[in-house]
Image (spheres, grey):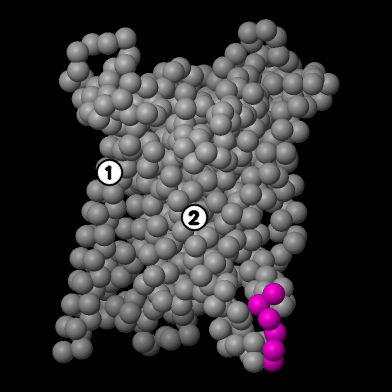
Amino acid sequence: MQSRVVKPLLAVYTGLFLLFLYGPLVVLAILSFQTGPEGGPQFPIIEWSTYWYQHLFGLTPPSRIAPLPIEESLVRSLVLAFATMIVSTVLGVTSAQAFRTRFKGSGIVFYMIVLGMMVPGVLVGLGMALVANTLGIARHWWSTAFVLHVVYTFPFAFLVMLAIFNRFDPSVEEASWSLGVSPARTFRKVTFPLIFPGVLSAMLFAFTLSYDEFSRTLFASGRELTLPLAIYGTFSVEIHPNVFAFGVLTTLFSFALLGVYAVLMSLSVRRAKRLAIQEDA
Amino acid sequence: MTIADTAEETGTSTARARRARRTALWLITPGVLWMTLFLVLPILMMVYVSFWTQTTFAINPVLTTKSWVTFFTSETYLDALWTTVRIWLLVLAATIVVGYPTALFVGLFVRNKTLQTVLLVLCVIPFWTSFLIRVLAWRPMLGKEGAINMILEGLGIIHAPIEALLFSELSVVIGMTQIYCVFMVGPIAFMLGRIDPNVIEAARDLGAGFGRIFRTIILPMSMPGVVVGAIFVSVMVLGEFATSAALSGRKVNLLGNIIVTQVGSLKWAFAAVVGVVLTIVMGAVVAALLRVVDLRKEL
């Protein structure tokens, strides 16, 4: 391979690719420091300020620019993401556990679960709205939207857990059973600690996907908005740099979440190592 | 799944297997129930409602094919169908063209595991910014007073801002390409990473140039990755409406946008028809892609 030519060329290309990936976000972050309230969402920066960050928290004198309705929608989105995370992780773990024994119809069930992440959100959202209309059920973010969020995140949790169980050594469980430990206790004391890193990943997936989910929520959530819906509301009106400031803050929040995940992950890995050492001794 | 009884080894093992199957059924039931009620039922409902009678503000469960006829005789709907297919093909091609070289570099040329991980993580980080905000971020990039026009003017390449960058089909394709190309890079890089370096080494020792090696080894072996990426991108782009709403200034109407407007004006039956059409298009696309490469054999 003429890698002396090709490799540097591809390296430069990858750099450009990353620029393409990050360019808009960098521009957005810069423009979030535009002066307000007269500064617009475009260059040039008239004056650097944190006006739009203050605007988000209602710390600025009232102006014609309406604040984003983030306070309530943020709480709703967090509650929704948390509930989705719990339910889809539980469903994911139990379903993947069931798949360890070959049962009848497992092929169909597999595709049925995976279908949940494949079908576009706008379609399930529409279908759910139709079902709710026909049955006369009121649509809310905590009911109709919530079940759709689980439909979306449960397949991810399921696939993560399936991958974890594939690499799982069942002989430790058998050893536990043969020592007279009940299956429930075996799961709690032996299986669960071993699959915990996978469970954490499934939870992270479910939380972030639900927190940002929007196309399923649009038709299924009724009047009370979740955070992505509140942002979508700004699409139809003139956008202001407050949306950009908000984007910067949510990104920082996501990184904090990622940090928590990394800490929990390293703790559980370290614990697993310590247990392994105890066994050896 | 219970305590092994050493006295009757064979008897307990069949009993245990039976019990294991029963436990498995109990464990899978909640998941199956959830998906039946909240995924399969809504989709069936959509098909059913598409045959309901639509009046100006209400729908009645009287079966008719009128909404279907309206769809296939209306220029607006057929236009949207054609636009959806066109945008999908453009974005699919763009994500492959933009993503493949990066995947090639990350998956094949970077042999240092740490650097490889760092590059992949760099590709994934933007996903922790809200999807809608990533879409909105293209506005200050592409606008008349946007960053790209400013830079091009600053460099003296153009003298008047390019207005076609924003609120056009081009802006929708650019936006979607950036948002979805990572789903192409990931699977391709994964497949390329599995190629045994010795194979390439051997080909080189036998005197093959890079072009030849790429055509005969690298490209065929990366095809499953391209197909997986294409499935991801297709499914997401076909169901899209937010990017075109934000970046096209209502000039580009995808099937998704039509559904949103129809629901907004309570035309449920029309929305359902569009939904079913979209489902059929998507099913056909995914089935065709799976036909190109037998995934089960490759994975």
Chain name for mark 2: A
Q: Residues within 10 Å of mark 1 (few under 14, many from 20)?
A: some
Q: Nearer the viewer, residue A275 or A51?
A: A51
Q: Residue furthest top?
A: B56
Is circle 1 on the same chain as circle 2?
yes
Q: Secondary structure at mark 2?
A: helix
Task: Give the residue at x 69% y 74%.
Answer: B211
Bounds of the magenta segment:
B206-211
1 vs 2, front mark: 2
How far apart marks 1 and 2 lie (CA) works out to 24 Å
Q: Earlier in the sequence, mark 1 or mark 2?
A: 2
**Lateral position of residue A31 relative to residue B40, left or right:** left
Which image quarter is the N terminus of chain B in? Answer: bottom left
The part of the image, by quadrant, that contains residue A93 is bottom left
The reply to whether residue A201 is visible in this rendering is yes
Q: Secondary structure at mark 1?
A: helix
Per the rendering, the mark at residue A278 is none
Task: Give the residue at x 53% y 60%.
Answer: A13
**Residue B296, how many percent across, how many down?**
65, 68
Task: Give the residue at x 67% y 7%.
Answer: B56
Name the residue that disc number 1 marks. A252
Task: Give the residue at x 68% y 81%.
Answer: B209
Name the residue that disc number 2 marks. A16
The amino acid on which the numbered mark 2 sits, given as a three-letter code, is Leu
**Residue A240, how many percent across, how many down?**
37, 22
Chain name for mark 1: A
The reply to whether residue A102 is visible in this rendering is no
Image: A164 above or below B242: below
Which image quarter is the C terminus of chain B in? Answer: bottom right
In magenta stretch: residue A101 = no
